[in-house]
Amino acid sequence: MNAEISKEVLDKIKEAQRTNPEMRLPVIITLEPSSDSDFSNLESEGLVVEKPLAAINAVAGTVPANRIGRLARQPRIRMIEYDGEVRAIKTE
């Protein structure tokens, strides 16, 4: 089973394919609930772990755009999302 890859990550992958397939993308990877904190198999796919996010069973890091598809096939990964700035929208 492949993990879900957010539309924003898919868009960034397409952009990187045109410019630089090795471009590192900041991502948040949500893991299956029973996953442990051993990230060696994810790191072997190119993930550089920047911060474990234990409260949400995820990890933040960077990965080459051309390796995300392989990373998504790891059985313990549920979702790969872009780790970008989020801003609140002010409504009146």
Image: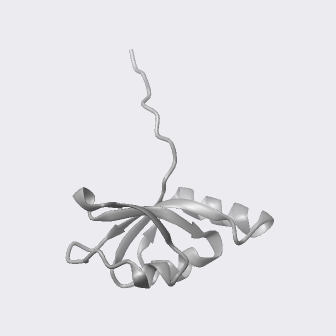
Res 39 quadrant in image:
bottom left
Q: Nearer the viewer, residue 30 or 11?
A: 30
Where, quadrant-wise, is the C terminus in this rendering? Answer: top left
Q: Is residue 3 left or right of residue 7?
A: left
Q: Is residue 66 above or below residue 84?
A: below
Residue positioned 37% across, 64% down in the render: 59
Where, quadrant-wise, is the N terminus in this rendering? Answer: bottom left
Q: Is residue 10 left or right of residue 37?
A: right
Residue positioned 49% across, 61% down in the render: 27
> Is residue 6 something one can see in this rendering?
no
Residue at the top extreme of this rendering: 92
Residue positioned 20% across, 77% down in the render: 34
Q: How many marks?
A: 0
Q: Give the x, y percent position of residue 5.
A: 48, 67
Residue positioned 70% across, 71% down in the render: 22
Q: Is residue 40 left or right of residue 85?
A: left
> Is residue 9 something one can see in this rendering?
yes
